[in-house]
Amino acid sequence: MPRVRDVLMGQLGSLRYEPIEKRIRATAGDATVVDTTRARLVWEPKRVVPIYAVPAEDVAGEIVAGGDGAAEPEQPPMLAGRPVYDPSVPFAVHTAPGEPVTVAGAEGFRPADPELAGYVVLDFKGFDAWYEEDERNFSHPRDPFHRIDIVHSSRHVRVEADGETLAESSRPYLLFETALPVRYYLPPEDVRTDRLAVSDTSTACAYKGQASYWALDGRDVAWYYREPLREAGEVSGRIAFFNEHVDITVDGERLERPVTPWSRR
């Protein structure tokens, strides 16, 4: 009997799509370039996060054929033992048949699949802002099959780097996110922030919001959300460490370091 995760991961090599009923808009400067209630989410082969595909008639502006593609990376990120393409792999890397196009100065792509006839896939980063209904979207479209759960716990968590204790807490919030390792969000008073340095790094998550980072000896090892999105509001101000870069022990059992797209960052 197969695990559900294995079934889903087994489709990574396919072109996948899902209709959505949300109103989707994209802006460039003060201009609204996309306004549609007929968007579809598209995952090209190997992609683990979706991108918007919209009907060509719902795009304000000319769709110009032609554009630059990009070669597939020789060493792609890994997830669950498989090579995957996460948002660090440029939009211009296409793994499905189709035609590159340009839309309002941004990259686009017309997939050759008949299920997507009349649609153009658009580079999320090529526009100034995206909205689902009236709410700003960050980083990439939200995946309806991806979720986060935050659970309060009394498990004992210790975080170490090269044998040095960086944090120890029995008040963690555990954040479970589809296909990713459990993340342990700790109260800042249980973390040795005196040993860490504020990092200039800032990233965005479609489900949690804008993250700020802590570094150890010049390497980002932990992050936190000052003003998370409402789904992640409970972890506001709490600090989580990369399981990939430090040693985390839970109730006396040291966890294996997972291999994820963050392993090489």
Image: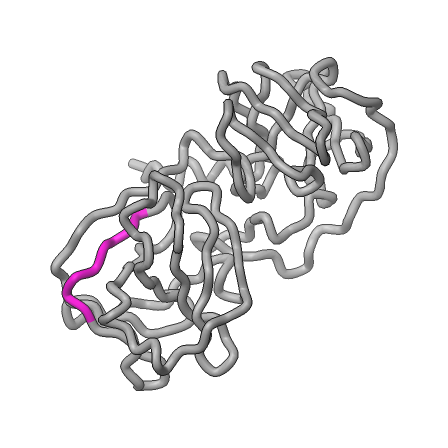
Does 126 lie within the magenta span?
no
Q: Residue at x 50, y 75 (%)?
A: 219
Q: Residue at x 39, y 42 (%)?
A: 229
Percent x, y of residue 251: 14, 67
Q: Quadrant of residue 15?
A: top right
- In the rendered view of the protein, which quadrant contains the C terminus? bottom right
Q: Residue at x 39, y 62 (%)?
A: 258
Percent x, y of residue 30: 71, 31
Percent x, y of residue 134: 50, 25
Closer-to-camera residue (144/58): 58
Image check: 49 left or right of 176?
A: right
Closer-to-camera residue (256/89): 89
What secondary structure predominates along the stretch shown in magenta?
A: strand
Percent x, y of residue 237: 33, 58
Looking at the image, is 101 positioned above or below residue 219?
Answer: above
Residue 254 appears in view:
no
Q: Which residues are magenta?
A: 169-176
Image check: 85 left or right of 189?
A: right
Image check: 190 left or right of 183?
A: left
Q: Residue at x 59, y 33 (%)?
A: 130
Q: Which scheme is used to colour this image of the protein?
A: one colour
